[in-house]
Image (cartoon, helix red, strand yellow):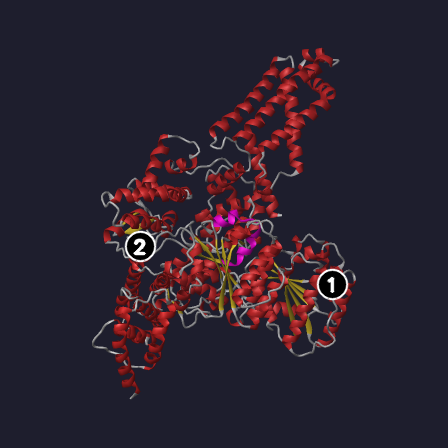
């Protein structure tokens, strides 16, 4: 038997090697000598399936056994290999390292006991420290690293790690038809409008209400074979030229035709064009497609249609598009976006949407919400009685928040099991403590008044409560908030909150409430009126300059006053009726007029210069939001008038007016200094006013 | 004596062997990504968000959760992108994505190239692309990158079902959104996963295993020492273990081990402990003050946040502050601020010492 012969041969070799290795000192770095010794043996051990047990032992026996382990790693004795690493003979240590390398390679797929791996790692580290040969040290380093990696590799998958894909998606639009629920009425409205004479439809609704998902469904044929839908996400073409956009629409149309497969593309391609001839070529292309498709209708689905405002600008393309739509037969368009048509500023866009049917997309019905909750996790989550209704109450059927709450529930339950009311509450709590970026971003886009009103209502109301608009005005007084809003301001703020679908009005009444309870909870817990006012003050303070600049600004301001007084003195000296005026307070106005006349040019120029300088020093244009030019001019003029008035009042030889002037000057400067002293950031009255103006302006700009 | 100290990690962990715990977080992230949801990792600084991003692609973790090979994760460190322009970002993204998707020719750094790449790899070869963005607030705050480009990225990810997973430098979503400028619209598609401190068993694994690998066995009293100083916060655990490992070397004097350890820990960790302290909200500070003065904690969002951040922990059957050093810091701040009124620490002082809601005036 070859097997027995192989072992016998190895036993013979071991005896010869015992003597050879004993007197032949092979250096660990002498790889060639080692290979000359090991290679003939390896040929035999590779073929020998039985472990070569060699009774007499010795280095020859060790070498053969290690080589056998190298070629039969599954049966290697780890302890022997590790022990042999301490051998004084380099070939034994080299063979042991090779055997261990082989064992570790096998271990990568065999998942050995981590404890064994850790012990191996420790032993290897020990040997590594003792090893003197560079070559072996290098090999041992590799072994140490590999055992470390293997030992720290996570345990094989347990039931807990069985990854269940979360089927709820909050944020990205839904493409898969089987994950899309409801909206049948909207599809009917769109279909009826397009078949009944409307050349376009505007699908409008707040962000994350499912407009894009609905367009995707239409793109997948939800309106039937009568339409050939062409979906174009205009976000992907923001900032491009009209011709580039038209090129993208053509490309999308060609792809849709190819996907549809009913008509061929032959002879339909549009040559690349630019400039004025671009739209004509596009028009011809669309005309040919419409003809070829007949009796089917070409339907463009333009997502985020607001972007067209920027692209079309003041060009005539919108009008040309409108003409294209009026052709019979012609294409049809569904525009989807979150901006209402009446809010569009571009006249050309309004032309394009002039004859469109307006369809509002809002929340899901109770039944649609039930489907959205239960169907995606069918067979995995089992919703107890009352839980689906509770999710509907908490989300109002807003698809985004339904998905979000369900996503949390799915994670809490690890994708399986019964879902009870406590799970729903836990998921809601998770949301209020760790809100979605969308919620925070929506909040950030609100004006201060909208935030104040939203916060006041959220704090005042309990779940499902309604509130009268008049009550909101009183709320600020009753709760002793340091801010008062007028009825008109509250009304405006409520309109903004309704626009984003946060607040809803009672069907047959004026009362209001939050549409989405989880949002109300988040606002009530995280955005109190007090917090808002404090943040406002903080941001206002951050927008103005530091103490040193404040000081310089104050010095310049005072310098202007000091310079102004001699100027005024001069005015007195030369004023034709100065003396008369001095004696009579009644003609103070006339005196002031003459002073203005005589000193207007130098006074205003000097005062405006120092005013602007002081203003510039006081105002720190943070975040790239400097004050508007009109505001700077207004403030500078204010400073000029203030200075002139002060000088005049101080110089007039009339006790009462002088008293008023000095008192006002002392009062304002005193208040400023007092505020500087009290404020940790040393910001006084003027700085705070500037900060307020900057924040207010910033808010206006963000909203626009 | 072991020369190599295995507790020297203070930044992102790139080696699987040095990564511990986070099973639940990885589960949540994978589960969402595989379902097509982009994820933003939020949590305090130094809690290990960037390491978690790296861990998503560790072979062991992938095999543990049976992540299919078709899911390709492209890592982008956006610190490189501070002040860069759209072309630079595109070049970086295309290069890295091309490597990961095994596409040789990615084309010039233009938007069309991105679309072509996705078309080829995602549509053509059914790969699922996940883009891991480390320090992604750097990108969001980069004013060289236009709103149009963020809109494009959103449209691109929606068309090809590409997911993003981002780790920001800032703590929570709200803080990140406050600071982010132009790119905030991009964040609309993200869901968030909170990354807090380690769970107890994970922290213990982090304490014991690396030392054992170096032949040093931390005994229960050592573990207690580390948890007393660092709680279950991975960064502070690393610091405490690092010094304990040094002190446990045979050539080190073993007298006054506790004092020496605390001194060394304090020396290295203090800046970050102060930072953690300063980032606490007023309500959290009030809750901590009440707790430090022996009061009871009522269930409130502030207490929940403190627990989630790992500042309040349950250890050996009692609730306590995660770190003795942090506790001392809190007490000294209370004493100091009670003595002085105002100053630059006015905010902290008022938060600690006053119960009434404060209003700095309004508009």
Instruction: Residue A386: name its quadrant.
Output: bottom left
| Above/below status of A190 relative to B332 | below
Main secondary structure found in the magenta portion:
helix
Q: Position of residue A332 (x, y in %)?
A: 69, 68
| Above/below status of A595 relative to A479 | above
- Reply yes or no: does residue A141 show up in magenta: no
Which one is nearer the viewer's eye here, A115 or A300?
A115
Instruction: Residue B153: name its quadrant.
Output: bottom right
On the question of residue A441 being in view, the answer is no
**Picture disc at residue A321:** 1
Badge 2 vs badge 1, beta-carbon distance below 8 Å: no
Secondary structure under tag 2 reads helix
Say yes or no: labels 2 and 1 on the same chain: no
Q: Position of residue B87 (x, y in %)?
A: 61, 56
Q: Residue furthest left?
A: A56
Q: Residue furthest front?
A: A23
What residue sits 41% from the left and 70% below the top?
B66
- Residue bearing the label numbered 2: B207
Which one is nearer the viewer's eye here, B333 or B136?
B136
**Picture disc at residue A498:** none
- Reply yes or no: does residue B189 show up in magenta: yes
Which one is nearer the viewer's eye here, A220 or B41?
B41
Secondary structure under tag 1 reads helix
Q: Which residues are magenta?
A: B174-190
């Amino acid at each position: 038997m070859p097997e027995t012969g192989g072992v016998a041969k190895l036993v013979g070799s071991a005896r010869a090697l015992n003597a050879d290795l004993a007197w032949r000192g092979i250096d660990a770095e002498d790889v060639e000598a080692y290979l000359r010794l090991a290679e003939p043996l390896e040929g035999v051990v590779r073929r020998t399936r039985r472990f070569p047990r060699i009774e007499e032992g010795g280095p020859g026996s060790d070498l053969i056994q290690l080589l056998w382990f190298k070629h039969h790693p599954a049966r290697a004795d780890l302890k022997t290999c590790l022990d042999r690493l301490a051998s004084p003979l380099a070939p034994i240590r080299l063979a042991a390292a090779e055997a261990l390398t082989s064992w570790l390679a096998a271990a990568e797929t065999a998942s050995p006991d981590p404890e064994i791996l850790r012990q191996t790692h420790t032993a290897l580290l020990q040997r590594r420290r003792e090893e003197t040969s560079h070559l072996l040290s290098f090999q041992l380093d590799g072994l140490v690293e590999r055992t470390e990696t293997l030992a720290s590799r996570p345990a094989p998958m347990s039931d807990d790690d069985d990854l269940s894909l979360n089927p709820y998606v909050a944020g990205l639009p839904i493409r898969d038809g089987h994950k899309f629920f409801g909206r049948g009425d909207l599809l009917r409205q769109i279909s009826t409008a397009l078949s009944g004479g409307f050349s376009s439809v505007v699908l409008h609704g707040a962000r994350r209400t499912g407009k894009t998902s609905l367009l995707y469904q239409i793109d997948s044929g939800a309106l039937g074979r009568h339409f050939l839908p062409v979906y174009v996400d205009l976000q992907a073409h923001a900032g491009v030229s009209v011709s580039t956009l038209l090129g993208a629409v053509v490309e999308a149309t060609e792809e849709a035709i190819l996907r549809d497969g009913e008509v061929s593309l032959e002879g339909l391609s549009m040559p690349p064009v630019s400039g004025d001839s671009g739209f004509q070529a596009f028009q011809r292309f669309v005309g040919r497609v419409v003809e070829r498709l007949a009796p089917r209708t070409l339907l463009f689905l333009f997502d985020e249609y607001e972007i067209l405002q920027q692209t079309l600008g003041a060009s005539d393309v919108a009008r040309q598009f409108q003409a294209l739509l009026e052709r019979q037969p012609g294409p049809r368009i569904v525009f989807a976006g979150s901006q209402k048509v009446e809010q569009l500023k571009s006249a050309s866009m309004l032309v394009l949407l002039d004859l469109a049917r307006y369809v509002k997309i809002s929340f899901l019905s109770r039944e649609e919400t039930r489907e959205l909750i239960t169907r995606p996790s069918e067979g995995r989550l089992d919703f107890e009685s009352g839980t689906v209704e509770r999710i509907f109450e908490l989300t109002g059927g807003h698809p985004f928040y339904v998905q979000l709450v369900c996503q949390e529930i799915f994670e809490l339950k690890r994708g399986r099991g019964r879902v009870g009311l406590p799970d729903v509450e836990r998921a809601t709590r998770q949301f209020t403590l760790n809100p979605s970026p969308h919620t925070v971003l929506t909040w950030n886009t609100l004006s201060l008044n909208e935030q104040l009103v939203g916060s006041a209502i959220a704090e005042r109301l309990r779940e499902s409560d309604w509130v009268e608009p008049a009550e909101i005005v009183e709320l600020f007084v009753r709760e002793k908030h340091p801010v008062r809003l007028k009825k008109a301001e509250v009304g405006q703020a409520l309109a903004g909150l309704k626009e984003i679908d946060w607040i809803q009005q009672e069907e047959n009444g004026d009362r209001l409430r939050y549409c989405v309870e989880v949002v109300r909870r988040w606002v009530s817990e995280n955005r109190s009126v007090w917090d808002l006012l404090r943040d406002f003050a903080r941001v206002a303070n951050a927008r103005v300059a530091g103490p040193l600049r404040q000081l310089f600004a104050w010095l310049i301001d005072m310098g202007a006053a000091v310079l102004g007084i001699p100027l005024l003195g001069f005015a007195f000296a030369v004023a034709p009726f100065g003396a008369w005026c001095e004696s009579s307070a009644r003609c103070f106005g006339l005196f002031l007029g003459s002073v203005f006349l005589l000193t207007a040019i130098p006074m205003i120029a000097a005062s405006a210069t120092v005013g602007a300088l002081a203003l510039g020093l006081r105002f720190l244009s943070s975040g790239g939001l400097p004050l508007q030019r009109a505001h700077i001019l207004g403030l500078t003029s204010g400073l000029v008038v203030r200075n002139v008035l002060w000088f005049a009042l101080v110089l007039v030889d009339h006790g009462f007016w002088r008293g008023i002037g000095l008192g006002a000057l002392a009062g304002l400067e005193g208040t400023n200094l007092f505020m500087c002293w009290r404020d940790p950031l040393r910001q006084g009255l003027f700085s705070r006013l500037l900060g307020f103006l900057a924040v207010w302006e910033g808010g206006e700009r963000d909203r626009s | 004596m072991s020369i190599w100290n295995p507790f020297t990690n203070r930044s992102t962990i790139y080696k699987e062997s040095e990564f511990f715990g986070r099973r639940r977080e990885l589960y949540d992230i994978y589960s969402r990504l595989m379902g097509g949801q982009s994820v933003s990792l939020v949590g305090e600084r130094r809690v290990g968000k960037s390491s978690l991003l790296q861990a998503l692609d560790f072979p062991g973790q992938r095999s543990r959760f049976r992540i299919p090979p078709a899911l390709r994760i492209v890592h982008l460190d956006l610190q490189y992108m501070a002040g860069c322009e759209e072309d630079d970002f595109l070049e970086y993204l295309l290069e890295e994505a091309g490597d990961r998707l095994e596409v040789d020719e990615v084309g010039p750094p233009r938007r069309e190239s991105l679309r072509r790449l996705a078309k080829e790899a995602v549509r053509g070869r059914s790969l699922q692309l996940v883009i891991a963005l480390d320090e992604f607030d750097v990108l969001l705050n980069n004013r060289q990158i236009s709103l149009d480009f963020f809109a494009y990225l959103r449209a691109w990810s929606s068309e090809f079902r590409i997911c993003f997973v981002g780790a920001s430098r800032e703590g929570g979503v709200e803080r990140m959104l406050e600071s982010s400028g132009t790119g905030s619209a991009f964040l609309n598609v993200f869901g968030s996963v909170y990354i807090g401190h380690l769970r107890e068993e994970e922290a213990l694994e982090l304490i014991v295993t690396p030392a054992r690998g170096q032949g040093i066995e931390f005994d229960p009293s050592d573990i207690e020492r580390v948890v007393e100083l660092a709680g279950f916060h991975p960064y502070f655990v690393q610091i405490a273990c690092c010094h304990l490992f040094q002190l446990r070397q045979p050539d080190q004097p073993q007298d006054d081990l506790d004092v020496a350890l605390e001194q060394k820990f304090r020396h290295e960790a203090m800046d970050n402990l102060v930072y953690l302290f300063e980032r606490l909200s007023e309500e959290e500070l009030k809750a901590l003050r009440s707790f430090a003065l022996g009061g009871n904690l009522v269930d409130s969002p502030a207490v929940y946040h403190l627990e989630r951040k790992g500042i309040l922990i349950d250890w050996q059957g009692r609730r306590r502050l995660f770190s003795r050093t942090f506790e001392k810091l809190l007490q000294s701040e209370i004493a100091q601020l009670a003595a002085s009124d105002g100053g630059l620490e006015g905010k902290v002082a008022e938060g600690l010492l006053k119960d009434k809601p404060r209003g700095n005036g309004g508009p």
